[in-house]
């Protein structure tokens, strides 16, 4: 009888579809960590997919005209020194390697007592602190890089500014039979504004003609300045040990020099106007500040509990709180 009563009272195996099981699964640390990884991956995939695939195909470019007397469009075309391979190394490979090396050095030489670390455990295995720190920092960096690419793409297509080598590459003509041409800076068409035209230099590659309207802002400068500025903020926040200060200053100087070198290259090879480079540098620096300081919180102060002992050396002390920056002792 007792056995039957206990059975009738509902001591049964829980159903996997019951709310209690769902709550337990959501409260499982392994499930939460795996969900976080999946969500972060989907967010980054969506941002980069829109910036690199969707917008270039679907977003039209503003058809901006020109004056024949515009001297800023009459520069000769020069082959740029930097390619997309160099850009990929500067904004992807270099920052990821920089962050990985710094976190490994910190894990090996910086005492754990001076650290404020967030530890993760997945499937019973403790994840090393430098891996979790790399994941968080690189994730925020890629998020900011995706925002930079989105902003660059939307701005380039919406402004449609012509590059300095426009006349040399396009050789524009207009009119019903293509009889309209620019004859020197002081020619008969020097004061007219031409908006509808065709490019007649058929020897120019199609990919070069397609980017002749995408001068503002400079994409190379924006992404490079973003990457180098982010690394400067990151080095300032993470390389705070006294023996790292000289190395930190050297690396920050190298990052700043690399960013300035890219700015000079885009101007000297007539790839962008001076204002395009200035706007790209400002945009990249602003996004780096937003990603490193606001999103990542590299310089955020946290409250740390510290037990202090009174002067009369009694057995029992008292606990106090003080604000400590995550980047300093």
Image (tube, helix red, strand yellow):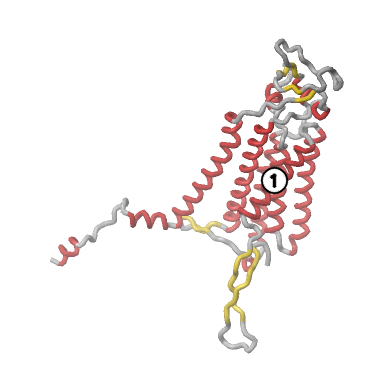
What residue is shown at x 78% (from left), y 16% (from top)? 181
What residue is shown at x 74% (from left), y 29% (from top)? 162
- Inspect this view and state whether residue 86 appears: no
Question: Furthest-left residue in view?
Answer: 1
Reply above or below: 221 against 202. Answer: below
Q: As rendered, which of 170 and 128 lies closer to the eye?
A: 170
Question: Furthest-top residue in view?
Answer: 177
The x, y position of residue 10, in whole percent, is 22, 60
The x, y position of residue 286, in whole percent, is 69, 48
The x, y position of residue 34, in whole percent, is 47, 51
What residue is shown at x 75% (from left), y 37% (from top)? 276
- Inspect this view and state whether residue 89 appears: yes
Quadrant in which the N terminus appears: bottom left
Q: As rendered, which of 171 and 142 lies closer to the eye?
A: 171
Reply above or below: 188 against 27. Answer: above
Reply above or below: 168 against 265. Answer: above
Q: Count the marks: how many?
A: 1
Q: Is residue 264 left or right of residue 107?
A: right
Quadrant in which the C terminus appears: bottom right
The x, y position of residue 2, in whole percent, is 15, 67
Q: Secondary structure at mark 1?
A: helix
Disc 1 target residue: 226
Reply above or below: 124 against 58. Answer: below
Residue 68 lies in quadrant: top right
What residue is shown at x 71% (from left), y 62% (from top)? 240
Q: Residues within 10 Å of mark 1 (few under 14, many from 20)?
A: many
Residue 178 lies in quadrant: top right
Question: Furthest-right residue in view?
Answer: 186
């Amino acid at each position: 009888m007792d056995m039957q009563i206990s059975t009738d009272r509902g001591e049964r195996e829980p159903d996997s579809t019951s709310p209690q099981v769902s709550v337990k699964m959501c409260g499982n640390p392994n499930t939460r960590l795996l969900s976080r990884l999946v969500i972060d991956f989907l967010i980054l995939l969506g941002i980069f997919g829109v910036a690199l695939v969707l917008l270039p195909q679907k977003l039209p470019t503003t058809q901006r005209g020109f004056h024949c007397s515009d001297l800023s469009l009459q520069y000769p075309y020069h082959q740029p020194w930097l390619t997309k391979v160099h850009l990929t190394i500067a904004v992807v490979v270099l920052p990821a390697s920089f962050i990985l090396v710094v976190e490994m050095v910190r894990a090996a030489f910086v005492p754990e007592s001076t650290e404020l670390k967030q530890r993760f455990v997945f499937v019973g295995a403790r994840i090393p602190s430098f891996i979790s720190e790399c994941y968080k920092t690189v994730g925020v960096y890629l998020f900011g890089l995706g925002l930079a690419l989105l902003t660059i793409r939307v701005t380039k297509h919406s402004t449609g500014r012509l590059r300095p080598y426009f006349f040399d590459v396009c050789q524009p003509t207009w009119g019903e039979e293509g009889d309209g041409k620019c004859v020197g800076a002081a020619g008969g068409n020097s004061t007219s504004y031409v908006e509808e035209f065709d490019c007649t230099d058929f020897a120019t590659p199609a990919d070069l003609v397609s980017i002749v309207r995408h001068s503002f802002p400079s994409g190379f400068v924006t992404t490079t300045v973003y990457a180098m500025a982010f690394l400067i903020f990151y080095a300032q926040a993470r390389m705070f040990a006294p023996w790292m200060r000289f190395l930190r200053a050297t690396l920050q100087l190298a990052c700043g020099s690399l960013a300035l070198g890219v700015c000079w290259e885009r101007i000297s090879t007539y790839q962008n106007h001076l204002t395009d480079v200035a706007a790209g540098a400002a945009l990249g620096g602003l996004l780096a500040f937003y990603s490193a300081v606001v999103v990542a919180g590299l310089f955020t102060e946290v409250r740390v509990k510290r037990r202090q002992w009174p002067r009369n050396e009694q057995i029992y002390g008292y606990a106090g709180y003080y604000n400590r920056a995550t980047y300093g002792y």
